[in-house]
Amino acid sequence: MTDTSQPAARKAQEFEQVVDKADRNVAAFDHRQKSLIHRLQHTLHSNPTLVPIIVLIGAVIVFGLIAGGKFFSPFNLTLIMQQVSIIGILAAAQSLIVLTAGIDLSVAAIMVLMAVIAGNLSVFMGVPPVIALAISFVAGTCAGMVNGFLVTRVKLPPFITTLGTWSIFYALNLYLSGAQSIRSQDIDANAPLLKFFGETISLGGARITYGSILMILVFLVLWFMLNKTAWGRHVYAIGDDREAAELAGIRTERTLLSVYALAGFVCTVAAWASIGRVGSISPQAFYEGNLQSITAVVIGGISLFGGRGSILGALFGALIVGVFQSGLRLAGVDVLWQVFAIGWLIIIAVAIDQWIRKVSA
């Protein structure tokens, strides 16, 4: 009788070896795949401005190829800077709030209200422009502190708080201005200092406004405060985990109040720059400034959940919006589809942020 048990056992053993080798290969492949994903996630998590920088560079290259020399002309590039300067400064103020896991829907209303106050005082009431501006800066800081007080002391959610104060500040705009704009001629005659940031300097074929330079300076100063001071570390700690920050001895309420006050101050900087940019003062100007500032913050890689991101990302976010609008315009795309493209940018930016958080967990 033939013994078939040994060949069968040998075949079974060989089959198990083949399966085991295949399993090891698959495991090694999965490990490489996971390692690549985790390395990418870690890089993006450690460098939150990397995504907006890549998007900005890619957008510049693409629209440069589509629009040709018109896009890269000094006039067009400096025009982009001018167009995003006001929203960029507002985005800097918005970033401060978002880093603490809050949101401010009143930044544009504060900005316009401070412009109306400075304009009324200097143009119609004869107050020296320097004093009028100083009063507006104090008022803007106080407006931010009102938001901060309601959030820290009354314990209201930032979204609801600033939604309410947006309506209040907007109503004050209309009341103080009588719903009337202050004309450029009146500003020139009585308070030309208010239009200082609308002045330009020429560099080759480019004309750079002082407002564009101001925007960059605002971001650099705030970046230094957030990254090189104890106050900045406290801001990030509060946004990451407020309860843990309190246990670590951080005075969270005082820090939050200072953040909202500083945001109000930055909004007043934007108010002064906006007068120079527009040339007049309208109580209904920059009506969509709140949403545009949030757009720049989100596209710039600052997490809406707080505690992660660089304020410089908001600058890149504002520039990305400006580049897309300019590039699509030069390509002959209708304004409707420009807004459509920006909407997709926001969705994609939030999806990337969620993906980074999910993988890091």
Image (cartoon, rainbow, N blue to C red):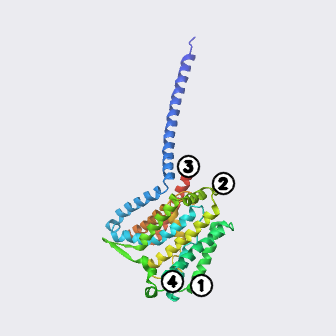
- Nearer to us: label 2 or label 4: 2
Residue type highlighted by circle 2: Leu
**Which residue is rendered at x = 66% and y = 66% of the image?**
152
Q: Which mark is residue 247?
A: 2
Residue toward you, 149 or 331: 149
**Which residue is rendered at x = 56% and y = 52% of the image?**
357
Residue type highlighted by circle 4: Gly
Residue type highlighted by circle 3: Ser
Q: Earlier in the sequence, mark 3 or mark 2?
A: 2
- Nearer to us: label 1 or label 2: 2
Q: Earlier in the sequence, mark 2 or mark 4?
A: 4
Task: Report the residue marked by disc 1.
Answer: 175
Label 4, label 3: how many angstroms apart (C-alpha)? 49 Å
Q: Circle 1 sits in a helix, a strand or a loop, which is it?
A: helix
> How crowded is the residue under tag 1: few (<14 C-alpha within 10 Å), some, or many (20+)?
few
**Which residue is rendered at x = 52% and y = 26% of the image?**
17
**Which residue is rendered at x = 51% and y = 81% of the image?**
131
